[in-house]
Image (tube, rainbow, N blue to C red):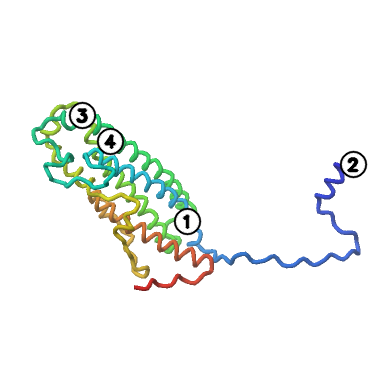
Amino acid sequence: MRVLIAILLAMDVPAAPGTPVPEQPPLPVIARIKANSLCHALKELALPVALVVQRNDRDFIGVRKAILRFAGASVSSGEPPVPGDPQQAGDLDESGNDASLYTPERTMAAANIDRLTFTILTNLADADRVMNRSWKLHPAHSDPAYDAFRQRVQNVIDLQRVLAFRLDDVAGMYFSNAGTGSFLRSAEAAEFQAGLDNAIGTDLRADVEAEAPLTLDPAHLPSGDVAAIKNGSASQVATALRIQKLALALESVHLGRTCDGLPPAPAATP
């Protein structure tokens, strides 16, 4: 009997005929959302990809530390060696002695570079799946505004991937020439030194914005075409990545306010 009573109480039993049903007050409006394709883009693209980018930013900091260890810099001070300075451990031994390059410390640092860049690329595979789902739901040229926002998200993914490959080139050349005994006397030595110098000078710290503020005019954001910069050096790619990330952040904030029915954010005062 108790079980039956519990079931009846849980059911929506209709009132008896002739019994007046009290009028229910209208539900409160929590938020008015402007639903359009760009609001979908914010939820489908920007938010999940931002989580991937944030994870990778932490790993890029680890790559920086490993590069400085490889070059012999003080990680605690964070000051990179001066490229081209023969007194710095980052320069190759002009005597051509490979033994001076293949030390346990450098080998461990190179292994960390390789491991962290692999993690970054693995994370980006998650972002690729998000983008592939977007292409299926919103084919190209079906909505120009959606396409433009999606391209901005794609730029950040592509530049993080290119940067990971550029930085891993140091570890790749290091390990591929291990045991040859003649790497420092080969034609690749100069290319390796140039790549190492550039990697040393590439700032990947999370607080780089605080030290070197980057501002963009929301009304004149940079182009979404980054094809040319993909062939650049690690430092050039890192700079382009910072610009594209900031542009995406500005667009996402503006879009978020629009989707929430809020007025545009007030312009920053000089």
Task: Check disc 2: other Cα within 10 Å, few if <14, some if 14-19, many if 20+.
Answer: few
The amino acid at mark 3 is: Ala
The amino acid at mark 2 is: Met
Q: Which residue is mark 4?
A: 109
Q: CA distance from mark 1 to mark 3?
A: 48 Å
Q: Which residue is mark 1?
A: 138
Q: CA distance from mark 4 to mark 2?
A: 73 Å
Which circle's residue, 3 or 2, is located before the other in the chain?
2
Considering depth in this image, is 216 or 12 the residue closer to the camera? 216
Q: CA distance from mark 1 to mark 2?
A: 56 Å
Which circle's residue, 4 or 2, is located before the other in the chain?
2
Q: Which residue is mark 3?
A: 178
Q: Which mark is residue 1?
A: 2
Query: For residue 111, which quarter of the picture?
Result: top left
Which circle's residue, 1 or 3, is located before the other in the chain?
1
Image quarter (top left, top right, bottom left or bottom right) of the C terminus: bottom left
